[in-house]
Amino acid sequence: MLEELIGAKMSIPEIDTNVICLTIDVEWANDEVLSDILNLLNERELRATFFCTHSGINVTGHERAIHPNFKCNGDAIQKLTQNAGDTLKDFTDMMRYEYVVQLTKDFCPEAVGVRAHNLFCDSALLPIYTRMGLEYDSSYSLPFAPGLSPIWKEYDILEMPIYYMDYIDSMHQMSGFSLEGLRMDQPGMKVFDFHPNMVFLNASTEAQYLESKPFYHDYEHLLSLRRSGLGIRTLFIELLDYIKKEKLATATLSEINAAYQKNRNW
């Protein structure tokens, strides 16, 4: 199915199916926590797109994309501040954006996709993305919107909106952490966005996740905080098992992008 999606000559409407795209925002997770979510995927032979925040992320068999952090207190801007010193005041927004994107792209030189940390959006980023070989973005969140599909933006950037994000779910209790709550029968592409620490904790509220932040890289302590009952982890596993059982069509975002790039009509 996937080979046909990518390899066949087809029109854009034929590509706009109910394909499911599993994506992971690595979010500076430590290696053991990242391995946990990676193993859940690999055990079911499901591929995902990992949006990478730092170097050394090994997710063989999956796609790596970038997850730049443009916040002033983020590691990239802090590094720029240290390097530039007093001259930082002379940097324009565009110069800062370019620095952050380049720094993150260095972690994943093969990346063709981007999702900004905190879903940060600025039209000034698009020409920078294009110059650095990034072809698609996935930073627009449209929770549970039916009929979603990729859309072209300026500078030839393909936007792939997010159908579901675990952090938003923990804030607003949108799904009830049940498969039924994901509204899988709705038409359109479904880009799912999960975070390793939230899955590891089986968090069900934003407060639970925030309370764990002081121990963000302490594997044993995080494991002791893992909740029982319904939460992000149980939902993630239920979703993966459902995809596998029902043999639903899945693709990485780069595969969707490749199909769209191939079938452009302008």
Image: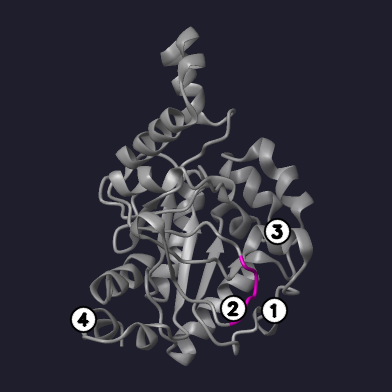
- The answer to whether the residue labelled 1 contacts the one labelled 2, judged by CB atoms less than 8 Å apart, is yes
Q: Residue at the spot x=64%, y=47% of the render?
A: 222
Question: Quick one: 91 or 231, which is closer to the camera?
Answer: 91
Image height check: is 138 above or below 230?
above
Using the numbered discs, state the Cα–Cα distance from disc 4 to disc 3 in whole angstroms: 39 Å
Using the numbered discs, state the Cα–Cα distance from disc 1 to disc 4 in whole angstroms: 35 Å
Q: Is residue 258 magenta?
A: no
Using the numbered discs, state the Cα–Cα distance from disc 3 to disc 1 in whole angstroms: 14 Å
Give the quarter of the image for residue 59.
bottom left
Query: Which residue corresponds to mark 4?
Result: 7
Image height check: is 192 above or below 147?
above
Question: What's the mark number on residue 178?
Answer: 1
Query: Which residue corresponds to mark 3?
Result: 203
Asked whether residue 57 is in view, the answer is: no
Give the amino acid at mark 1: Ser
Residue 36: % across, % down: 49, 58
Q: In what quadrant of the picture does the C terminus appear?
A: bottom left
Question: Quick one: 88 or 265, which is closer to the camera?
Answer: 265
Numbered disc in front, either 4 or 3: 4
Instruction: Say whether disc 2 or disc 4 marks the residue closer to the N-terminus.
Output: 4
Q: Is residue 144 magenta?
A: yes
Q: Which residues are magenta?
A: 142-146
Give the quarter of the image for residue 238.
bottom right
Give the amino acid at mark 2: Glu
Residue 85: % across, % down: 47, 10
Element at label 2 = helix
Question: What's the mark number on residue 238?
Answer: 2
Element at label 4 = helix
Q: How is the image coloured?
A: one colour
